[in-house]
Structures are given as C-alpha cells and as structure tokens.
Image (cartoon, helix red, strand yellow):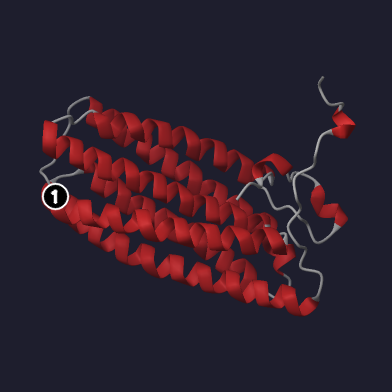
Amino acid sequence: MRLMAADKPTPPTPPVASTPARRAALARRIRFFVAATITYNVIEAVVALAEGARVSSTALIGFGLDSVIEVSSAAAVAWQFAGRDPKAREPVALRLIALSFFGLAGYVTVDAVRSLLGIGEPEPSTIGLVLAGVSLVVMPVLSYAQRRAGRELGSRSAVADSKQTLLCTYLSAVLLGGLALNSAFGWSWADPLAGLVIAGVAVREGLEAWRGQTCCRPPLLAADQQGCADDCCDD
C-alpha cells in the first residue's frame, strides 16, 4: 500500500546558522575555501596551459581555461563576502557565476567539435595525467566543504561556486580518461565526446545560477526559500 503524500518521510534538515557569531564564522570559512580554490586553480591553469601548448593538447588547454573560469567564479564569491552586506551582493555574484558556466560550456563545445573534426593531434603527456589525478583528489574536498558551509549560511552564490568546483572534478576525470585512452589505444574521440556531456551539465548549472535556483536549504530567512529545492540538497 502506497503512502499518502502527507505520510512520506521528509529528509532531515541541516542545522540553521541561527546566531550572528555562527554566520560570521561560516562567512570566514567560505572566504577561506574561496581563497584556497583560487590559489589551486591559478597553479592548475598555469601548468595545464603550458603543458597543453607543449604537447598540442586541446584537452589540456581546455582544462587550463576551465581553471581560469573557476577562478572568476570563486572571485565573484570572494567579492560578495568582502562587502558589509553579502546578501545584497548575491544577485550580482550569481550572474557572474552563471556567465562563467556559460563560458565554460561554450569553450568545451567548440573545442570538442574541433577535436572530433580531427584538428590537432595531441601527444601523450605524463604531466597532464598527474595534474588530472591530483585535481580528482583536491577538487571534491573543496567543493564539499564549501557546499556545506554555503547551505548552512543560506548562500546561493557559495553553493553555486561549489558546483563550479565540482564540475572541475568532472572535467578532471574527462581529461584523465581522454589522455589515458589516447595514450594507450589512440582513441582521440573519447575526450571530446565526454566534453560535450560536461558542456550540457555546465549549461544546466549556469541556468540554475542565473535564476537563483541553486540549492541553499536551509535559508536564514523565510523570504529566501524561493528557488531552493530540497531534492538537490543531498550531500
């Protein structure tokens, strides 16, 4: 016998940052994660772009440009929380994050199509494989930590930026798989096909950020509940 809608168990709600001291602590924590994300991505971008140019790898160059876009997303959140009233700056920060998603999707799509058309033959890159492997370890940790803090604080922009960081994790896996398959079997088409999937995800996340529909349950204020979907709040 099916349960009635009213009888369905509700998912547990994370604790709400109910005191000014707790909100201030969460804001400091988010600033720390943003700074760590920016620092790592700057290093990642320099290594990926330099190595990509050396071995003529469009995947590595695309990965490096993704790191640049990730820095712009994190910088938008840093700018928001540097002000006296981060909530007032949030709509602008969300738009900037959305644009970074769209920029990433556009570049990955163009780069994938170019690769499928056979433009450029990348050489094997050990440095690229190591970089992608390290990012697969670092990025999920930063994304999870910032997402938890952003949800408790009720910050849509912090959650949106954590999704950008998580998307970088997916791209790391795509890069790692593409470089490995191309090196082992000569399957140069594997990377661009996976890149098109990532581009689709980036468009979806960009639209959510643009509309302010990133998951931020629980909100600090009842008025903030608009656009926060419970089903996207699983850890």
Disc 1 secondary structure class: loop
Task: Tell me: residue 74, above or below residue 29.
Answer: above
The residue that disc 1 covers is: 125
Which quadrant of the rendered structure holds the N terminus? top right
Residue 129 visible, this orientation: yes
Task: Tell me: residue 140, above or below residue 107.
Answer: below
Outermost residue on the bottom side: it is: 21
User: Total marks drawn?
Assistant: 1
Residue 11 x/y as whole percent: 75, 45
Give the residue at x 67% y 77%: 25
Q: Is residue 35 left or right of residue 89?
A: left
Residue 39 x/y as whole percent: 39, 70
Outermost residue on the front side: it is: 1
**Kind of residue at disc 1:** Ser
Give the residue at x 79% y 77%: 20
Give the residue at x 14% y 53%: 126
